[in-house]
Amino acid sequence: MPDALQLLTTRRSFKAAELAGPAPTAAEIDTLLTIAARVPDHGKLTPWRFIVFEGDARVAAGDAIAAAFRAKYFDAKPEQVEFERGRLARAPLVVAVVSCAGPHVKIPEWEQVLSAGAAAMNLVHAAHALGYGACWITEWYAYDRGVLDALGLAAHERIVGFVHIGRPPGVPEDRPRPPLSEIATRYAASAGDSRVC
């Protein structure tokens, strides 16, 4: 397994369509999800869950996306509908991270949503650690109620992201990252203000 700091500093997103098979094995998927679940979770609420799309299930779920697209765009061309049908088939494995956040007497809902986001990021890092590439995206269908219903989400649940996982095409070039001087400050007791933006 790569050194942890090396792993964290070399993670890079890939386009979903760049990720090839073979998909992670069943044991590797269990490892990915186990690591994804190891996140801060105030109150031990487990305010997230995972939906795994593999094999033909990716296309079956795409039928719901295509149907919602047709309902929105009556004049859509057949090739556009087919493109939408293949949204979850671009990579050999897709995992939807679902936020189950809700009102709680003690735990703010915002903290629950952040925990789900942390689960998605852990999933991306776990994929990288196993030698896979990953892409965390939402796209329009993550916000379409018809699609969410078809995928089995409850009324209060939301998609944090669809994490596409597969074999990377090679070592990617890194993109420019913001300099620390632009994103980090040190709070000074005399200044009373740590704003950057």
Image: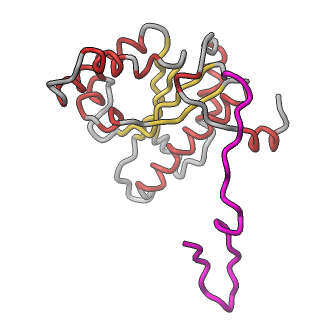
Along the line of sight, which residue is nearer the eye, 75 or 113? 75
The quadrant of the image that shows the N terminus is top right
Residue 66 locus on image (x, y percent): 28, 20
Frontmost residue, 85 versus 114: 85
Identity of the residue furthest to the right in this view: 3
**Magenta span of residues:** 169-197
**Residue 184 image point, x, y percent:** 67, 68
How is the model colour-coded? secondary structure
**Quarter of the image containing the C terminus?**
bottom right
Q: Position of residue 3 (x, y in %)?
A: 85, 37
Residue 13 in the image: above or below residue 44: above
Q: Residue at x 70, y 69 (%)?
A: 181
Q: Residue at x 59, y 73 (%)?
A: 196
Could you tell whether 41 is left or right of 181 in the image? left
| Residue displayed at 26% across by 37% down | 155
60 vs 123, left or right, is: left
The image shows residue 95 at horizontal and vertical percentages of 50, 26
- Answer above or below: position of 96 versus 11: above
Does residue 76 belong to the magenta stretch?
Answer: no
Image-based side of 121 in relation to 173, left or right: left
Residue 135 found in image quarter: top right
Q: How many marks?
A: 0
As drawn, 197 above or below 88: below
The reply to whether the magenta stretch includes residue 171 is yes
In the displayed structure, does residue 111 sit left or right of residue 141?
Answer: right
Identify the residue at the far top of this view.
56
Residue at image position (67%, 53%) is 177
Magenta stretch, main secondary structure, is loop
